[in-house]
Image: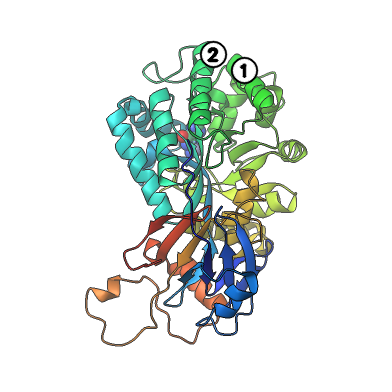
Amino acid sequence: MAAAQKIKRTVYVGPFVHSQSLQKLDICPTGAIGVDETGKIAFVERDVKDIGDVIPVTQKHGWQNSQIVRTKDNGFFFPGFIDTHIHASQYPNTGIFGKSTLLDWLNTYTFPLESSLSDLSKARRVYNRVVARTLSQGTTTAAYYATIHVPATNLLADICLAKGQRAFVGRVCMNAMSPEYYRDESTEAAMRSTRECIEHVRGIDPGFEIVSPIITPRFAPSCTRECLREQGKLHQETGIPCQTHISENKNEIELVKELFPESKSYADVYDSAGLLTEKTILAHAVHLTEEEKALIKEREAKISHCPASNTALTSGSARVRQLIDQGLTVGLGTDVSGGFSPSILEMVRQAVWVSRHVAMSDGDQAKLSMEEALYLATRGGAKVVGLAQKVGGFDVGMDWDAQMISLGSVAEDGLTGDEIHKDPVDVWGWESWDERVAKWVYNGDDRNTAAVWVKGRLVHQRASFRP
Ligand SMILES: Nc1nc2[nH]cnc2c(=O)[nH]1
Ligand SMILES: [Zn+2]
């Protein structure tokens, strides 16, 4: 059964920051957020006169005997990050990509590693670590690709539930153009395995409250038409979300044209199979045509922007400003291990940098601001995974999927050698709140992530954090 954690009513006291809109951050230095026993946000107070004395707030809401959790050291609460695209199975290869590009990278680095997770003890090591690592970096929701293996995929779902990370866990379907040693032997076999994993998740979390299955055709080249169609039928019958890759790399696009000459486009291959819907996550979308963008918008399919991966594999620079301006829904993805980091905070930076390079050729309007990239990492990502009403911000009625950021004490003289390593950010005391957030975005890392909650449950904390 789902880890139905009974939790205590808690008031989270201190500054909080979350996206108000795509362009605007809502920064509230004097906040108090009440989270009830089910992990839902019950109230949000913005003008706590003395955050040292929250009795008046607790009395106002009749929450006298609730637990109090305070920020400290120039800290603030921020919504949990949403990783809309990550290959849990590829985690050991993080940082290993050499000078490869997608299609050779798959054969050289990726298929060998993924196929080795048939060894369940290896899968256990990899999956325990990638869930622990991403939680430590504030990722409260992740859309995971596993491998073709049923036991290992079920294990990933078990680990996410046990550790309390919200997750979409996808058994990868690939019955074409894949190595003999690593492929589904037929459409029937692929669908049987996928259904087994869906039923496993239904068994451990019947309401998909924390862990949900997700139908995962790897990408068009690695599935026969029949296999794509069967997954499309399953997607339409069950309403279970689906994730895949699209238009990442120019050679891949040419390959799809050769393999599916009857289709009008890459997006049309998925659409013809019934895989292009409002519950579909399309990773990359670097080289979409105008027609494809219009079709994706019409189907309300979602986009996962994976800046680190697109740069590492020289796939291209996604025109995110254009995608947003044309009304497409965009979130961020680490795309480990095409991407070199499991950190969504790093993806916020990478999305800003990729947009700067686009701007150097397309003009300033292409630049993404820090605020916009943080929106993509939270509310945008929540829309991509279909949880926009539940997570991504601090609104009453949402779940407390949150992280406490601590920027450390104001910089003093006389730090000893080792102390300088404690905090990656130097705060001087004269910064505005906007400036503090900017310092976290551009200089911060997991050393600043003091604690992480999912649905009100404390799922990660640093030793320095005492709830
Ligand atoms: N980046 C990336 N693109 C893909 N396209 C198909 N499979 C993959 C993968 O594992 N990573
Ligand atoms: Zn991917």
Q: What percent of the width, then of the height, locates residue 440? A: 47, 69
Are dots 1 and 2 in contact, CB under 8 Å? yes
The residue nearer to you, when weighing 230 against 113, is 230
The way the protein has been coloured in the rendering is: rainbow
Picture layout, residue 24 above or below residue 153: below
Q: Real-space Cα distance between discs 1 and 2?
A: 8 Å
Picture layout, residue 435 above or below residue 306: below
- Residue drawn at (55%, 82%), measured in percent from left and top? 432
Q: Amino acid at mark 2?
A: Thr
**Number of numbered markers:** 2
Q: Residues within 10 Å of mark 1 (few under 14, many from 20)?
A: some
**Disc 1 element:** helix
Whether label 1 lies within 8 Å of ligand 1 gets the answer no
Q: What percent of the width, then of the height, locates residue 429? A: 45, 86
Picture layout, residue 143 above or below residue 121: below
Whether label 2 lies within 8 Å of ligand 1 gets the answer no
Query: Which numbered circle lies on residue 230?
Result: 1
Q: Quadrant of residue 232?
A: top right
Instruction: Using residue 431 as the reference point, say whether residue 49 is left or right of it.
Output: right
The residue nearer to you, when weighing 246 against 20, is 20
Q: Which residue is mark 2?
A: 187
Instruction: Using residue 192 as the reference point, say whether residue 266 is left or right of it.
Output: right
Q: Amino acid at mark 1?
A: Glu
Q: Residues within 10 Å of mark 2 (few under 14, many from 20)?
A: many
Q: Is residue 319 visible?
A: no
- Looking at marks 1 and 2 on the same chain, the residue that comes earlier in the sequence is marked by 2
Q: What percent of the width, then of the height, locates residue 42? A: 63, 61
Q: Is residue 402 visible?
A: yes
Q: Quadrant of residue 464?
A: bottom left
